[in-house]
Amino acid sequence: MLLHLNLCALFLALSPLASIAAPPSYDHPSQTVLSQAASSDILLRGLPILGPDNGCSKTLKTCDWMAKIPDNTPLVRMNLPGAHDTATWNYSDTTSYTRYPGPLPPADLLRCQERPLLQSLNDGIRVFDLRSIYDPSSDTIGFYHSLALSAATTTMTDVFFGLYQWLNEHPTEAVLLSINHEGGRFSAKIQEMMYDIINSDAEKKYWVQTSGSLGTLGQARGKLTLLQRFTFDLLPTYKTKRIGIQLDLSDRSKAFEWACNPPKVFELVYNADKGLTAFIQSYYASSHPLTPTPPQYIEEKFGVTTANLGNATLFNPDQLYISFASAPAMIVLRWLRVDMSPRMFALGNGTDTPGMNQKLLPWLKARKGSRFGVIMLDFYDAVPGLVEAVIGL
Ligand SMILES: *[C@@H]1O[C@H](CO)[C@@H](O)[C@H](O)[C@H]1NC(C)=O
Ligand SMILES: *[C@@H]1O[C@H](CO)[C@@H](O)[C@H](O)[C@H]1NC(C)=O
Ligand SMILES: *[C@@H]1O[C@H](CO)[C@@H](O)[C@H](O)[C@H]1NC(C)=O
């Protein structure tokens, strides 16, 4: 039980950012060359998380899928496929840097994706779940998953820069970033670093500047929208600017509710004045007291997930719904004993146990045309057609 509580707490931290010098627009050709060289440097550093951008065939339905949706569509009315714990896609025992004082579980238990960010965007994913951590060895903020850094040399700044580049090429698309800060104290220093990254002048044009509500697709196109899963509580008083919406989980009692306890759907009021609530299903514990079988876990989580998705199709069209269809963390750790990774959770074991993604596909298809909201997936690509089914293509 102690382990259980600690892990829940561990999984609910905050998120950081770094500061990027976006290349100013130079007129002189040699300066253009310089700024291009600087961009390539940043993209190279970002590669372990961003991956390469292999382009996006315009015949692919998922490529610029938002282009066809009217500008005045509220984001909360859309179906937005997301990648849970995206930065883990290339997580391995060799590439990843450990800050956990103990042996790490095998990498496949921490990996939730197999495709990097830029490819995910080309595949239609529009929401990323990024967990960040301050790395004192480089004095930067990087990405993390539960026990270890995903890539030791890639900073948050590098990753944002890659996303800006992608948005430059896909100006019809809107990308939401859910960011927390995990695994360590969210000190005043780290908070200020994050604040400065998000609010730097160079980055402003790439972030939706509205605070407290999600607007329309038209307002979000070509930009990132922040889903802030952390609280700025130690900033200097003059740093008052806020953007995006705050899905604040720093209150441990709420955090517990979010992840570990019934009610399995957590109603989070993120703007009391406007009556805006997020209905969030991020249940990653299990009501099974001991070690259940993989099918029991999958069945339970499928039930919880489709309960929230089902409500999204029926109720509150102007409220935000977020459903994590991803493997619960507790399951991952318990699976150390029963051979179940997030991959197996998503895909089953090949024959007799269907995974979450396989079960979700027909469920979504049967409700084509409905509003589902945000759905966070593990291994979204491994079941063909799943992203299309979320979007409703
Ligand atoms: C992914 O990890 C492998 C080692 O496991 C490494 O060789 C490869 O360069 C990594 N890919 C990227 C894009 O960083
Ligand atoms: C679905 O909505 C109904 C009606 O508001 C509510 O009673 C129920 O608790 C909701 N289910 C979940 C899983 O949130
Ligand atoms: C799949 O999982 C089920 C339930 O745990 C198990 O009974 C079955 O033997 C597994 N099948 C394979 C091919 O691993």
Image: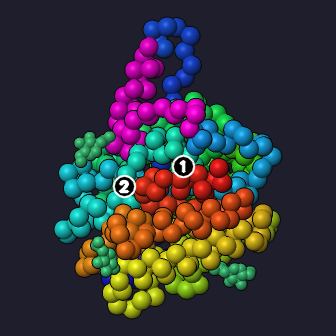
**Dot 2 crowding, Cα within 10 Å, few <14, some 14–19, many 20+:** many
Give ligand 2's quarter of the image.
bottom right
Pointer 1 or 2: first along the chain: 2
- At numbered mark 2, what does the secondary structure look like: helix, strand or loop? helix
* The residue positioned farthest toward the bottom in the image shown: 289
Q: Position of residue 328 (x, y in %)?
A: 43, 73
**Label 1 to label 2: alpha-carbon separation:** 15 Å
x 37%, y 74%: residue = 352
Asked if disc 2 is less than 8 Å from ligand 1, the answer is: no
Question: Is residue 139 shown to the viewer in this render?
Answer: yes
Taking the magenta stretch, the answer to whether it contains residue 53 is: yes
Task: Give the residues in magenta.
Answer: 33-60
Which quarter of the rendering shows the N terminus? Answer: bottom left
Circle on res. 125:
1
- Position in image of residue 322 (x %, y %): 61, 65
Could you say where residue 33 lies in the image, as x and y percent from the top left? 44, 14
Type of the residue with mark 2: Thr
Q: Name above or below for residue 7 compared with residue 237.
A: below
Q: How is the image coloured?
A: rainbow
x 40%, y 64%: residue: 347
Q: Which residue is mark 2?
A: 88
